[in-house]
Amino acid sequence: MSKLTVHGAKAASAATSKSDIVVVPLFTNEDLSASASQVNTAAGDVLQRAISIGDADAKLGKITTMVGSGNIARVMSVGCGDRASFNLEAQLVVTAAVSGVLAASKAKNVMFVGDTIADNKVALAQFLEFLGRDTAMACYRYTATLGTPKPGPTLTKLTVAVDSISAAKVKQALSVGATIGNGANLTRELVNLPGNVCTPSYLAKEGRALGRKYDKLSVSVLDEKKMANMGMGSLLSVGNGSDEPSKLIVMKYDGGPAKQAPYCLVGKGITFDTGGISLKPAKGMESMKFDMGGAGSVFGVMQTVAELGLNINVIGVVAAAENMPSGCATKPGDVVTSMSGKTIEILNTDAEGRLVLCDALTYVERFKPAEVVDIATLTGAIIVSLGHEASGLFANDDGLAESLTAAGLASGDEAWRLPINKRYDRQLNSKFADMQNIGTGTAGSITAACFLARFAEKYKWAHLDVAGTAFQNMQKGATGRPVPLLVEYLRQRAG
């Protein structure tokens, strides 16, 4: 995969640049800007002709590509709709459309004429971040287990020409976006890997590799013996049926003041989920390699935070296990003791994510965290509720919930809050233990969150159920969500 470099330039340079493609935004009822007109002239008037015959127009997200001349091999117009309606959602439509076409093209060197995108410097920087992020993500291709990978994107240089902010500011905004995109791509790569490659031990190795890459990031791994000594009977019960040993991976980023309370991210890392003794149907089980999407997002966020050098302390914890049936596997009706001392009656071994997360949530108490967010592909019920558009959000603190919601909106990586309260929580009452691991059959996403809430009573906590957003299907694969949301949340917390 080619490495993308980003640059800023003066708007006037667009017409003289030696670019494979020059991208020109079009707005409804607006003439071409001075720089766009110069590009049109340098390219042989192709853009104006395309507009005059109706091939190119300002319809939101519409892409039209034209053969140019001279230094400009091709001109590409992108519709931005009405200026008054060019909000965050519209910007994301444009950046997704542009980046997708650029990644699919043979272009290596692209110039984007950005002088008309926004008069407001903040809005322009936001757009540039989206453009950098979406371009980096569009250039991702999975090749790890392909014998003969197909040629991937060739794009290596993206330059934005604009006068309202300096070239350095343009480059900075694009670079931040590309860094977030690269973090999401790391998440996608880990989540896309097959279960026989991406095991708990593999995740532990990847965590240590991240720790070696960044000076402010230290990594430790708890093996099954250490977890047993700490009383993590719930987490360990999930991996009982597997030959793959479970791991607890702890990544500490020390970017803030030494005495600053850390922000903790806890990821569900079920590297393959058969359902255990409560075996899943064979059809579609191959997609259960995606069940470590929460863990994958923690890796992506930790890389991004370290790469950006955020002034904040962040601890990422990944609870990794493989859920398999065998003679040693945990059985429905078994009772296990969690690290907190609370006992759990396991009525369904396919509700395993909450069993690894609850011990990880107890573990992070030792860090006296400012806030804790867990991320998990936890329930199919959340897809029934929210589809593939928004992640489910649950929290025991309104301020934290509002911050995550705002971060989701600002990043275009939306989350929607659902309730947790005693009316739902009582579904977890058990005759044979302190609680059971599933409810009575309704509101499955909510009762799963209620279960986790019982282990997060000593700090501000939120839960993101990303079963509908972390991946789409076997063909499309992992999405990289909710890395953009979480990075935006931590950037806001870092000020």
Image (spheres, rainbow, N blue to C red):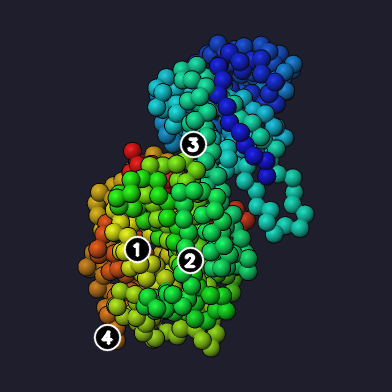
Q: Which residue is mark 2?
A: 221
Give neighbour class at mark 2: few <14, some 14-19, many 20+ (Cα, 10 Å): some
Mark 2 or mark 4: which is in front? 2
Q: Which residue is mark 3?
A: 176
Residues 195 and 219: in front is 219
Which residue in the protein does label 1 denote?
A: 364
Q: Is residue 412 visible?
A: no
332 or 27, which is in the foreground? 332
Q: Amino acid at mark 4?
A: Lys
Q: Nearer the viewer, residue 257 or 467?
A: 257
Q: Are marks 2 and 3 in contact (CB under 8 Å)?
A: no
Return the disc, 1 or 4, that comes first in the chain's sequence: 1
Mark 2 and mark 4 in contact? Answer it, CB < 8 Å.
Answer: no
Rendered location of residue 367, percent (x, y): 32, 60
Which image quadrant is residue 347 in? bottom left
Residue 123: image location, x then y, percent: 41, 27
The quadrant of the rendering that contains the C terminus is: top left
> Can you tell which mark lies on residue 445?
none
Q: Residue furthest bottom?
A: 327
Q: Secondary structure at mark 2?
A: strand
Q: Secondary structure at mark 4?
A: loop
Q: CA distance from mark 1 to mark 4?
A: 29 Å
User: Where's residue 112, x and y in %?
Assistant: 58, 25
Give amino acid for label 3.
Answer: Val
Is 197 on the left-hand or right-hand side of 130? right
Mark 3 or 4 closer to N-term?
A: 3
